[in-house]
Amino acid sequence: MATIDGVVIKDSVKVERIGVHSHIRGLGLNERLEAAPVADGMVGQLAARQASGFIVKMIQEAKIAGRALLITGQPGAGKTALAIGISKQLGQDTPFVSISASEVYSSEINKTEALTQAFRRAIGIQIKEETEVLEGEVVSLEIDRSATGVGPKIGKLTMRTTDMETIYDLGSKMVDACLKENIVPGDVVQVDKSTGRVTRLGKSFNRSHDFDAMGPKVKLVKCPDGEIQKRRETVHTVCLHDIDVINSRTQGYVALFSGDTGEIKAEVRDQINRKVLEWREEGKAQFVPGVLFIDEAHILDIECFSFLNRAIEGELSPLLIMATNRLIEKVRGTDVESAHGIPSDFLDRMLIVNAEPYTNEDIEKILKLRADEEGVKLDSNSLALLVKLVSTTSLRYSIQLISVAEVLRMRSKEQTITTDHVSKAYRMFYDAKRSQKLLNDADYLL
Ligand code: ADP
């Protein structure tokens, strides 16, 4: 945590709901914005990926303001995957916020407040800060534990660069930090002097022979030179919403972790906006507009749409991407039918991309990518079965089965997942269609 000009900022710890999309690293396009059949974790969907690439270009050339993107397509057609691909293509640190339109209807805050918060979560700010750090190779780390195991721990850390060596006394907080990071001699570490945070930069080349057994994942780095104590520029990336919450006196710090933020006063936001714009002028901060993805867009009502209409014009607006699988629907809060349940004046401002249903070949490739991503081995029959199951269940369900089947495989101690594991997993957990049918068929409910 840091304070700049009396405004408290904090690195946001984001737990985004993108676990099932972790294999997606971009849109997989070449310089001419053509999509390769499989690249960056993206499979097929060539036309939609190319169109998405154009949108990325438009954003980079600042030609998108006041517009939004609509992705249409059936569930499991990869609408969310495309939106994530776009955000990754914009930059690996681009904030990505995903909500379902139904989340806007909460009992605690009104709809426009919920949308404002979502918008501001999707706007990142990089703040530069100078800090004092210690950087060097760990020569030795001694920790004195009291005989009883209770009471403060103290220790001594010896660090060196190619030019010098120094011994530092460690208090209990630093000892804990070293233990938590599992610091051992031969590690090259950075210690943030103000926070006491210890970061391992890698293993020293000098000691590489000691680490032969540690596998290819170990990153080898040079032992630093010069002084151990250095000034470093560190960059915090925070989202506007977190700055709002921390600086909004009535909620403060706890709210950030409980997620229970309530409404934030307009004055607080105005003040934060003024501050961050000032920081940008002074070169202290940079904006990273992200992507706000609203799934099930047809659930939004006319009030939400008029809010969004204004919000996407804003100077700090993230890219708004909406998704829906509806063809024609009444716009909520009106009697007017409109394409995708979206008012026509808003539709006029949208670029529309269609995510087409996948072929079995594409589905097989996606399932394979997921298995690789989770470090799981599927034999060819089990992969074929998972592909087949997609047609009666859904792609998301089949992807879930991979993890369940893997747990079953580990218990059976076999080398790869077989059809046996997949069918067991299929019988253990229901997909939405079967579970619905179960309740429908249950005559005991009548
Ligand atoms: P939708 O949002 O349309 O319901 P998703 O994007 O959630 O569909 O797709 C379902 C699953 O399939 C997700 O895990 C997603 O990451 C994966 N997926 C979808 N399309 C692709 C693709 N073209 N390439 C790789 N993975 C994909």
Image (cartoon, rainbow, N blue to C red):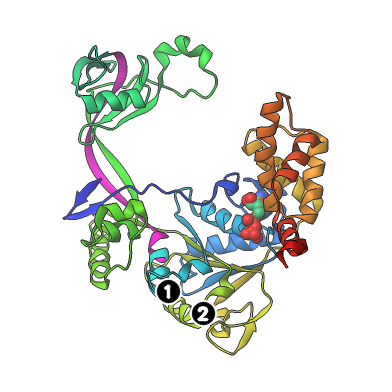
Mark 1 nearby-residue class (10 Å; few <14, some 14–19, many ≥20): many
**Label 2 – label 1 distance at C-alpha:** 9 Å
Corner quadrant of residue 248: bottom left
Does residue 33 appear in this view? no
> Which SS does the magenta portion mostly show?
strand
> Residue type at mark 1?
Lys
Q: Is 350 positioned to the left or the right of 129 in the image?
A: right
**Residue 292 part of the magenta segment:** no
Above or below residue 307? Residue 199 is above
Q: Which residue is mark 1?
A: 111
Above or below residue 44? Residue 207 is above
**Ligand 1 lies in which image quarter?**
bottom right
Does residue 106 appear in this view? yes
Q: Residue at x 60, y 44 (%)?
A: 23
**Residue 128 part of the magenta segment:** yes
Q: Report the span colored magenta.
A: 119-141
> Residue type at mark 2?
Asp
